[in-house]
Image (spheres, grey):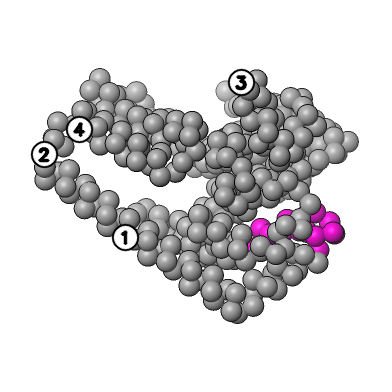
Amino acid sequence: MPSQIGLEYRYIVVAAVIPAIFYYLGTFLAVYFEARRLGIGALPDDARPQLTRGEWVQTLVFLVPLGVLSYFLFVQPSVPKAGFYGLVAALCSTLALFPDFRSREKVWGAFVQAGRMAASIVVIVTAIGLIVGLIQTSGFAGRLSLLLAQVADGPLFMVLLIVAFGAIVLGMGLPPGATYFIIVIALSSGIDTVGIAPLTLHLFVVFFAMMSTVTPPVALAAFAAAPIAGADPVRTGFEAAKIALAGFLIPFVFVYHPAVLYKLQVVFEWFGEGAAGSRAMIDIATVSWADLGWIIIAFTLAMWMIASALAGFDRARLSATERLARVALGLACLWPQMIIAGPAALAGLALIIRERAAQRKTVEAMT
């Protein structure tokens, strides 16, 4: 993405922080309400595994390489250098923290396994060229790009739906990075005509490239997880799409609420960083902290209502009418205009409070 839009990697990372948090929040709430519906609670204290002090120290083998990798990507945005230093940090921390690994055979075996993994990645990357060629030869990319250019002056929502559809369809069976690359090439002549900031549009593509891995009928991630769980792959795909629902909403949220992506760039400006890069994408003075605070509250409330509606359970089982009302109010909370989003948020909050009060009265009556 930095090479496509001419923006340094660190600015993209900062912009993606809040959408990433939103995604995990939505996934957490989906699992939380599903667990409530199934009556799954916390493990008792005596059943919880306890880590020793040595095991806690050994967890640094994950944190140190990640920290080194992130540091060099931010300080000097060079992927090869960051990867090299991250590799050195991983090797040194493993040798220091795991005595059993300090042998020539173990180190050699790790490099052999890494080489095999790298070879599989090379095959995937090579196949991307074939896929791109087939897309171009078949004319699908040209038609999709032409359609995008034709509707670019129309309703923004329709344009975004076309981009999302293209990312999901072209991303079936591919890793998200490969999907992003293919989408950018396939829609190269049409994507520039969309009238939103390049960073916003490219992150929109990235999100739906990621969501293509959990979108039926070809939910690659779900099909990989199903054998591990001993579950039906098709059903796992639909469950994965339901749990990851937030990922389908977040791209539209940050398009219509720019503060989600751009307000944290102010932190870079405070330290004398990012002024040129962030303002090349959007004038960050046009979004306020109040805008960011509102959408954080609105998205949390919306996901609470939508996740509970999909599970059909909050404190107690929800009726079909209340489930529909929660979905409608949850989506309305994310509306760009406050004249709709504000009353929807108040109505949704009142609905949650009323349901909890009714459940509390039921419990008191039973006791």
Residue 103, labelled with which disc?
A: 2
Going from N to C along the chain, the mark reached first, 2 or 4, is 4
In the rendering, at what x and y percent does residue 348 appear? 75, 34
Q: Is residue 197 above or below residue 356?
A: below
In the rendering, at what x and y percent does residue 245 appear? 61, 48
116, 311: nearer the viewer: 116
- Residue sitting farthest toward the bottom: 138
Contact between labelled residues 4 and 1, with CB atoms less than 8 Å apart: no
Q: Is residue 69 above or below residue 172?
A: above
Cα distance in 3D space between marks 3 and 2:
45 Å
Cα distance in 3D space between marks 2 and 1:
25 Å
In the rendered structure, which amino acid carries the disc numbered 2? Answer: Ser
**Residue drawn at (60%, 63%) of the image:** 185
- Nearest to viewer (mark 3 / mark 1): 3
Q: Is 159 in the magenta? A: yes
196, 326: nearer the viewer: 196
In the rendering, at what x and y percent does residue 97 appear? 22, 28
In the rendering, at what x and y percent does residue 172 appear? 53, 64
Cα distance in 3D space between marks 2 and 4:
9 Å
Q: Which residues are magenta?
A: 151-166
Going from N to C along the chain, the mark reached first, 3 or 2, is 2
In the rendered structure, which amino acid carries the disc numbered 3? Answer: Phe
Residue 271, labelled with which disc?
A: 3
Cα distance in 3D space between marks 3 and 1:
41 Å
- Nearest to viewer (mark 4 / mark 3): 3
Residue 95, labelled with which disc?
A: 4
Q: List the residue tagged with mark 1.
A: 119
